[in-house]
Amino acid sequence: MDLKEHQDGESARCLTGAPGGAIFKVAVTTLGCKVNQCESAGITAAIAARGMALVPFEAEADCYIINTCTVTGKTDSQSRQLIRRAIRRNPAALILVTGCYAQRAPEEIVRIPGVRIVAGNAEKATLIDLIEQAATDPGPQVRVGDIAGEKGFATPGATVFPEHTRAFLKIQDGCDAFCTYCIVPAARGRSRSLPEAEVAQRISALAGQGFREVVLTGIHLGVYGRDLTPPGDLTALVQKIAAARPVERLRLSSIEPREVTDALLALMDRPGILCRHLHIPLQSGDDGILAAMHRNYDRVFFRNLIVKIRGSLPDLAIGIDVMTGFPGETDAAFGNTLQLVEELPIAYLHVFPYSQRPGTPAAELPNQISEEEKKRRALLLRKLGTAKRRAFAEPFLGRELTVLIEGKEEAATGLFTGFSDNYIPVAVRGNVDANQIVRVRPQSFRNGRLLAEVIHG
């Protein structure tokens, strides 16, 4: 540690009042999407840089940071539970709540006894300063700005992702789509992009830390670069990264149907670092519901897109998101969704019951669906998703796959787990270790994953 780092660390411990001059301990926990996880990784890096100690959220800490999500009512509730858990663990601790729930409902959170600071999404870049300032301003504080007017991309970079072998790099934030069910634009603001040069620098830094795979992520990833001067483009960015080959694998997170371009598919058809995997939200297979959601495609467009992708890239995994119980979703409308999903050659699906979000147009629509019916429909889709995963994975039995090993499952089984480049979960037998990319040959399919042997030579 150099002198400047030492001084910063001492300043942090002094200002935040760790007892007996002990090192100041901070615990961070995260709810929600990969973007939130990226931001928490940046927060933990900033904490370490100031000389504070990171401890598990289950440990006693001097400060707890809860990075919240507000995409559903359930995540709001989970966020409150985590806040109260931290307060019970150490009533004297500084409790700092940030993230999307904090951005959307700061006054609701600051009323929880024991919460000291509520910080918005734009304020995440200054959390460590807020912690230090709390020593001289002990009362509850709300530091939440107008996210709608935010134009900067101030998220701190991260090169450490504890317990992960793949790194997530946020290159885009915010959303301009305003789907009628979604609170995210209110919590994240307008679309903003990380400049290309900075993307390249951060991927190189992640590679330097030993990561073999980087996942490009964003709130609305497919519109990356449109706000830059001069304007950029996701496909052009991916092409440049693929040509430079800074890491062994590059993966994309969720991308909207109309943003899957022929040029992007052509990149995925070439040997290289770009993984054969796309996650494309469907939300509903009924045209009336799609229109009410303010989605910009219909079921025929979506079907044709998926069939086209799998026709040209048969080994590419396609995952989809599906929502059940949107207001006005009749039995017939849900039947249309179920039928379309049955027809689609997809690899897996994520199912979400609709959650009524105050402040969104859908929350005011008539014919809200009961929670019981939402759950019933979600169960039907999840059962279908289990069958889809098996149907996609089994044709790879006996074929060679490359797998990034993430870790050991259990000492008793001796199996290591990871994902193929086309996102099939694989359990591997053999002499391997975490963070290796190995060649394997699957022998069977069990419990939602392939079981494989390492190929030697």
Image (cartoon, rainbow, N blue to C red):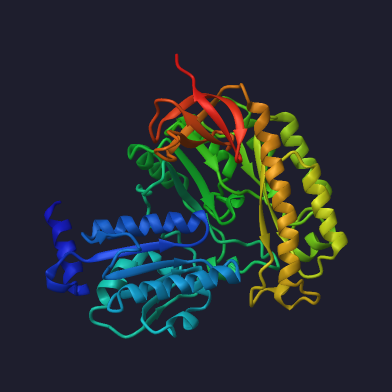
The reply to whether residue 386 is visible in this rendering is: yes
Residue found at x 19% / y 72%: 18
Q: Quadrant of residue 375?
A: bottom right
In the rendered image, residue 160, in percent from the top left (x then y), is placed at 35, 48
**Residue 185 location, x and y as percent?**
59, 67
At 78% from the left and 53% from the top, the residue drawn is 297
The residue at the far top in this view is 457
- Choose top left, top right, bottom left or bottom right for residue 322: bottom right
Residue visible at 69% across and 52% down in the picture: 382
Q: Residue furthest right?
A: 332
- Of 188 and 280, nearer the camera is 280
Which quadrant would residue 45 be assigned to in this image? Answer: bottom left
**363 sits to left or right of 251:** right
Q: Is residue 391 above or below residue 146?
A: above
Taking the view exactly as shown, the residue that stands out farthest to the front is 412
On the picture, is 413 further left or further right than 315? left
Residue 104: horizontal and vertical position, in percent? 53, 75
Give the residue at x 45% y 34%: 415
Is residue 267 in view? no
Query: Residue 430 in the image: x percent, y percent?
Result: 43, 25
Q: Compare residues 64 and 131 and report the one nearer the observer.
A: 64
* Image quadrant occupied by the C terminus: top left
